[in-house]
Image: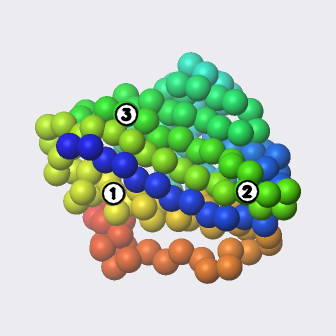
Amino acid sequence: MGVYNVHERLLAAKQHEVGVLIDTLASSDDELWPRRDWPPMAFDRPLAAGAVGGHGPVRYTVAAYVPGTWVRFAFTGPRGFHGFHEYAALAVDEEHTALRHTLAMDNRGAARLTWPLLFRPLHDALLEDSLDSAELACAGRPARPARWSPYVRFLRRLAR
């Protein structure tokens, strides 16, 4: 089963300003990952191709990295996740940049159930929180902060 999931936010910032947010991922000054409310993104070394890590039960390797522009993570877990997720800072014009997160994978075995029932709702909430973090860093506050659905709140309670 193929999964293609995109989250994008138009930010009033230059491409290099948004790209810097990608560069902070998994660092002590991370401005993109919503680590206050979600398991932190962590790697065995600074962000670079070949770094191994993930967040919570989701594991991946940095497959490719262009500083200030784009990073791709190849899934290594959970079992049944075969594909990648990535962040890209895409210039729209001189003063606006689209920050896009793309997840593309084939889910096999138990992941055919766990993705739609468990991982997708949590993933979607986490990504909207991440885009809020980017907007906070670029504009001082998100214009329309994301809100968790009752189902996401229920799943998070179960996880505790």
Q: Earlier in the sequence, mark 1 or mark 3?
A: 3
Residue at 38%, 77% (x, y): give it.
Answer: 149
Q: 68 left or right of 8? A: right
In this rendering, the label closer to the viewer, 1 or 2: 2
Q: Determine the secondary structure under disc 3.
A: strand
Q: Are marks 1 and 2 in contact (CB under 8 Å)?
A: no
Quadrant, the N terminus = top left
Residue at 49%, 26% (x, y): give it.
Answer: 61
Q: CA distance from mark 1 to mark 2?
A: 28 Å
Q: Which residue is mark 2?
A: 92
Residue at 63%, 45% (x, y): give it.
Answer: 88
Q: 139 left or right of 74? A: right
Q: Earlier in the sequence, mark 2 or mark 3?
A: 3
Q: Residue furthest front?
A: 93
In this rendering, the label closer to the viewer, 2 or 3: 2
The percent position of residue 144, horizontal first and vertical second, equals 61, 80
Q: Which residue is mark 1?
A: 120
Q: Which residue is mark 3?
A: 83
Q: Are marks 2 and 3 in contact (CB under 8 Å)?
A: no
Q: Determine the secondary structure under disc 2.
A: strand
In the figure, 67 relative to 11: above or below? above
In the figure, 45 relative to 4: above or below? above
**Residue type of the residue flagged with mark 3:** Gly
Q: Nearer the viewer, residue 63 or 46?
A: 63
Q: Nearer the viewer, residue 39 or 112?
A: 112
